[in-house]
Every structure is written in C-alpha cells, then in structure tokens.
Amino acid sequence: MNWYEIWAELWPTLIAIGIILAVVPVVGLYATFVERKLAAAVQDRLGPNRVGPFGLFQAIADGIKIFLKEQIIPSHVHTFIYMLAPCISLMTAMFALAVLPYGPTPVNYFGGLRFIVMPGLDISLLIMFAISSLSAYGIILGGWASNNKYSLYGAIRSCAQFISYEIPMGLSVIGVILVAGSMNIETIVASQGSGDGISGWNLWWQPLALIIFFTSALAETNRLPFDLPECEQELVGGFHTEYGGIKFVLFFLAEYTHVVTVSFLTTLLFFGGWHFPGVPSEVTASYGILALQMLVLLVKVCGVVCFIMLLRWALPRFRFDQLMGLAWKGLIPLAMLNLVFLAVFESLGWHRWPLAVLSVLLFVAAGYWSAWQSQSFVRKASVT
Amino acid sequence: MSTAETPVAQVEKKQKKKTVQWGDDPKIGFVEALYLPAIAGGIATALKHAFFKKRSTAQYPEQKPEMPPNYRGVHRLNRDEEGRVKCVACYMCQTACPANCIEIIAAPAPQDDPKWANRDKFPATFTIDELRCIYCGMCEEACPVDAIELTSIYDLTGMSRQEMIFDKEKLLSVFDETSKAGLDPVRTNRGALGPASEKSMQSTDSPPPPGRGKHG
Ligand code: SF4
Ligand code: SF4
C-alpha cells in the first residue's frame, strides 16, 4: 500500500471525525437552548429571548460564560479520577458516534466522501452498544471520585440502571437484527427501504420493540422520567454534585450527545433512516439526492430529540423500585416474548404484518396481567 | 409470673391496633398498567400548554409590573402642609425596627423660626440603611404621626453600599417624587397629619382620612 492509497482512505475518515468533533459541542449547546425554549413553552413562559434574535445567541453566551468560570476542585476529591471522569464520559459518548451514519451511506462503501467514521463494519450495532455501556464508567468514576455520599448514591443508581436497561435494549434490537439479517447499521437501514419508502420501516412490525428500545434508551441517557442518578430532590445533583464549570459541562455534553445518539439509533433502526416516500431509496453519488436523504434523516432525528425533550416535561420521575420493576418485570419478559414471535415468523418465512397485531396483543396482555397481579396482591395483603 | 396482660396493656394493645394503619399502594387498573395512555395524556397536556395557552411572561424592563398600593418598598419621610418634615423625632420607629437600620439624631426645633413654633423636636439627621432593612413595615406601624411610610418602589439599586444608606434629604425627596406621581401608600394617612401632631385634637368631626381602614 503506497502513501497515495493510505491518503485516499484517510481523508474521508479525518473529515468525518472532524465533522463530529466540530458539530457535537454546538449541537450540545443548542440542545440546551432548544430544551429551555421547549420547557418554557410547556410552562407557559417565553424562555431565553434576550441575546440575539429569538435569543438564538443565548447558547453561545452560556458557552462563553461556562468556559470562563473559575475551576474549583474540592479538597476532598480524588483529583486524578475526578478530572478524568467527565473526559471519559464525553469520550465514550462521542466514540459511540463513530459507527453512526449521520447521512446516507451505501452498504458497499466505495471510497470518497461519506457521512460515517467507520463505514462497512459488520458489527457496528454491537460496537455501538459496547461503547455506549462504557459511558457508565464516566458516571461511576465521577461519583466515586467526588467522595460525597450523594454523588456515590447517584453513581450506584446509575450503575444499576445501566445494567438493568442494557438487557431489554439489546433484546429489542435483536429483532431488528433478525429482520435485516445483519448487525451492520447501513444494511439495517437499507433493508427498510423497500417499496414506497415507508412500508418497509421496522416500526410497522416491531412497535413493541420500538417502545421497549426507546424506553430503555431513555433510561440509558439518564433523562427524565429515568433521571434517578441526578434527581435534585433526593441527591442534590447526583454524580455531578461536586462538579462545576467546564467539568460539569463535559458531563452535560455527554448527556446530550447520548440523547442525539439515541435519537439517531431510533431513527436508523425503526424509522427507516433516510428512507421516505418520494425520496429515492438508493444511495447514489448525486449530491442533490444525498442532500435530500440527509435532510430526511436529520429531520427525523430532530423530531425524536424534541420528543425526548417533551417527555421530560410531560412525565413525572419514576421511583427507584418502580424503575427496576419496569425493567425486570415488564420490559425484559416482553422483549423476550416479542423476540420469540419474531423468530418464529422469520424462520417459517411467514409474512411479517401479523406481528404488529401480535405486538399490540402482547402489550395489552402484559397490561392486563400486571393489573390483575396488582389486584390479587392487594387482596392477599388485605386478608392477612 | 402470670402471662395474663394487665388491663392497661390490653387497652394499649387495642389502641395500637387502631392507630397503626397500613397504606396500600393504590390499585393499578388495566389502563394504568398499560402506561401508554397516561404518557399520552401527559404529552397532550404539555402540548396543550405549549401551543394553546397564553404566555404569562412579563418582559420586565420594558413592561413594568403594577405594584399593589400596599406593597412595602423604599421608605419615605412625609412632609406636613408647611413642607416641614413631619417626623417629631420620637424614636418610636428606631425602637421598633427589628433590623436596627434606622438611626435618628434629634434636635430641639429652632425656636426663633416661627415656622417651627409649634414643635419641640425635629430629627437633625435621619438615616435608614436600605440594605439592612427587611421591609417589615414595623416603623410605619410604630410612628405616631405617620411620618415614615413604605412606598411601592421596588426597583432599588445602587453601585455602592454607601449609596444605599438614605439620609433625611433623600427620604424626603422620595416623598416628593411619590406624592407627585400619585403613588401614595394606602396603609397610613396619605400625608394627613396624625392625631399626635395636630394642634388641637378636634379632628373627630371630619371623616377619617382615606386608607385608614377598620383600625383607623
Ligand atoms: S421596614 Fe422594618 S426593617 Fe425596615 S426600617 Fe422599617 S422597621 Fe426597620
Ligand atoms: S416614629 Fe415617626 S415621628 Fe417618631 S422618629 Fe420615627 S419617623 Fe419620626
């Protein structure tokens, strides 16, 4: 391999990495802005509207302010780990983006400009999950190094939450892998592009898997209704109680990066990625079509991000035993049953449409079962 | 030893049985167990507020709030009809103040000046530390001649602590400003002389001044 060939391989990768590194902080800053605006709208307020038109520069002002803040390191922390934790947090969050196509990417990548750092990886979904579970390290190290009981509680909660919700998340995604017959995200997206661009989405035969995946992914991002690791009323700030200034922002950025990652994954796995009726499903070299497909993808992702932010202001927080119960007693059995049904359908080569009905039936049955259980439990308790 | 319980113990046991109550978790019905209807309801509420409710934000510096006339803000020292400071330097407010922020130095009223002929004392200096004040209104309650009042001015700012210590002139100028702007507070006498500073105590045949309320 001569230098020219290496360079031909290298430059698209470097550009893709550069785009991610440049865009993620801006996206993080503006995600806070959007979140503030959305929170204000839900609470009948106006939100930030002073800096620039519609308050658009508020995010930049916040960024400048937070970078210029005094760096305080409390005297009782393990300084090295304390400094390391936010870096690990953000690093793993950004690393997970490496296998995510943020624009249309063909299955058989041929070289040249592209919208993914690591194209054509056969196990990209697996890598995605492996890396995203690493992000628990940042939180746990942060909580431990803070040398503060509340922080440690937050970290432990986060750890338990991560371990519990990894399982339903993985199980729900196996269905998608079965349908596409591949763990490659590009292949999974391509498999959803059949027909008119909307009837092939995994959403239609896997609605239950979508709900389970989205719920567990929300729990993994530590966002409300599942933000037990940092709930203010119980733990001050949870694992980031002792963090301030730029170190806190790194944690924060990691959280928003997670939100973006989760939104991308939801879109790519269940909402057909860059497929949409009227948009050509083939990834070609034409720039116009590429731009259109990218627009479709980004609009879908923005929709999911906004939905996640809206959920924050619509739902109350879970109690910790409810959180664990939801994962172990609700999502995991449901995901397993769903997977069994899907596997049967796939191996017998039946049509997939009845799966949607089955999903709904399964969900309703689970609801009925849990209601019945709770009633009979109350009955028993009142007898004794 | 006998195992029979004493009557007292029996009663205690009975009471315990009655007073201790177990709170059950609320029963979860079928619809609640599905979670999704409740989530959809929450989202619907959020969206309703986001799109259909009026924004209640006041754009503060441009859009000033209208303070209720009984708001307790910056103090003022009232003047009587002759433009003299109404305060008779009785130290009532200084004594009543829980924050110890009023400081008065009394002086005998200038005897040779006919304007002050009916007064014994007047405050030579009268300072209020507006930063220390907790705006409780005790001073105006205590004042026998309604000389000190809390106005509805709320946006008190300054660049230094020294600036926030108001002296007699400053407090009198607050009176001039607020009475000119029609911002007289409603709690006290709105500038009418209190009974203790009347020349004669025959104010009973005139109707009570406005704003005195039931307790006037
Ligand atoms: S309002 Fe209260 S604290 Fe302020 S000067 Fe009057 S008595 Fe003192
Ligand atoms: S109570 Fe009234 S009259 Fe007496 S010193 Fe205070 S302000 Fe003056």
Image (spheres, grey):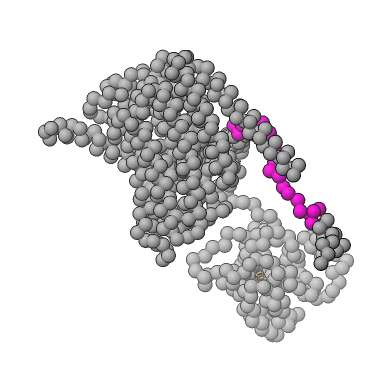
Tell me the residue at 56%/46% (across/down): A320
- B192 in the magenta segment: no
The single residue placed furthest to the front in the displayed view is B1
Tell me the residue at 53%/32% (across/down): A333
Tell me the residue at 52%/17% (across/down): A354
Viewed as shown, does residue B212 lie left or right of A168? right
Compared with B105, A371 (above or below) is above
User: Could you say which is closer to the camera, residue B65 or residue A64?
Assistant: A64
Compared with A209, A33 (above or below) is below
Viewed as shown, does residue B162 lie left or right of A25? right
Name the image quarter holding the C terminus of chain A. Answer: top right
Viewed as shown, does residue B156 lie left or right of A253? right
Tell me the residue at 35%/36% (across/down): A127
User: Could you say which is closer to the camera, residue B104 or residue A252?
Assistant: A252
The single residue placed furthest to the left in the displayed view is A2
Position of residue A318 measured from the top left corner of the image (x, y, whole percent): 58, 43
